[in-house]
Amino acid sequence: MLKTDSKKLETRDFISVGIFSLIYAVVAFVIGGVAQMTPVTFPFMPMIVALFTGTVFMLYVAKIPKKGALSILGVIAAILLFVTGMFWMMSVFFLGFGLIADLICASADFRSFKKNLLAYCVMALAPMGAYIPMAVMPAQFDAFMKNKGDFSSFEGVIHSIGAAWWAIPAMIIGTIVCAIIGGLIGKKLMKKHFEKAGVV
């Protein structure tokens, strides 16, 4: 008698993946959108998002502990970002970091909280795809922003991020720290789900 490999994504899993991916996207879009509303909070968007999406991510890997689930999350996020007119590098980051996060979690069968947290730290860096271009391709990014409309109120902070050598590394470190905090908050809030899924 043939046994079904429960580690593979099944039809019901794809439904759960779709639901959780949309929840993750909505939380990230709403929190990220609010954070980017003012020049003061603009640079802190990846960090703020990392704090609030940790619970969703941790619940996601506890509910769907199967290889491919996080890659699909990355694909869905990338498509939504592309459709909504975000800079292309952000979509590329979600695709790549989603795959890397998937491999990290799968290396311990999604049962290691440390591996899952590391994967979340990687995934949380995907929004940096909206900031790194300010430093590595400023002319292209400026042209992109001008095509989107008047960005004069944000021009100063955008150019400051691109010009200061320490800005991007500081944002990356800050995002990782916030991702760790967000992941730990998620673990505390979702303790029962982790215990049921056998995550340690």
Image (tube, grey):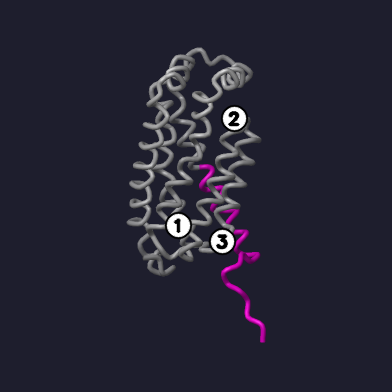
Residue placed under numbered mark 1 in the picture: 59
Q: Amino acid at mark 1?
A: Leu
Residues under labels 2 and 3: Cα distance?
Answer: 28 Å
Is residue 87 part of the magenta span, yes or no?
no
Q: In whole angstroms, how far apart are the C-alphas of marks 1 and 2?
A: 28 Å
Q: CA distance from mark 1 to mark 3?
A: 15 Å
| SS of the residue under disc 2 | loop
When asked about the image quadrant of residue 96, the answer is top right
**Quadrant location of residue 88?**
top right
Structural crowding at the residue carrying mark 2, measured as other residues with C-alpha within 10 Å and reported as few (<14), some (14–19) or many (≥20): some
Q: Residue at x 42, y 47 (%)?
A: 121
Horizontal arrangement in the rendering, residue 181 relative to residue 109 (left or right): left
User: Which comes before the other along the chain, label 1 or label 3?
Assistant: 1
Residue that numbered label 3 is attached to: 67
Q: On the rendered image, what quadrant is the N terminus found in?
A: bottom right
Name above or below for residue 145 compared with residue 16: above
Q: Magenta span covers which residues?
A: 1-26
Please name the residue shown 39% across and 38% down the image.
Answer: 175
For the residue marked with disc 2, what is the amino acid? Phe
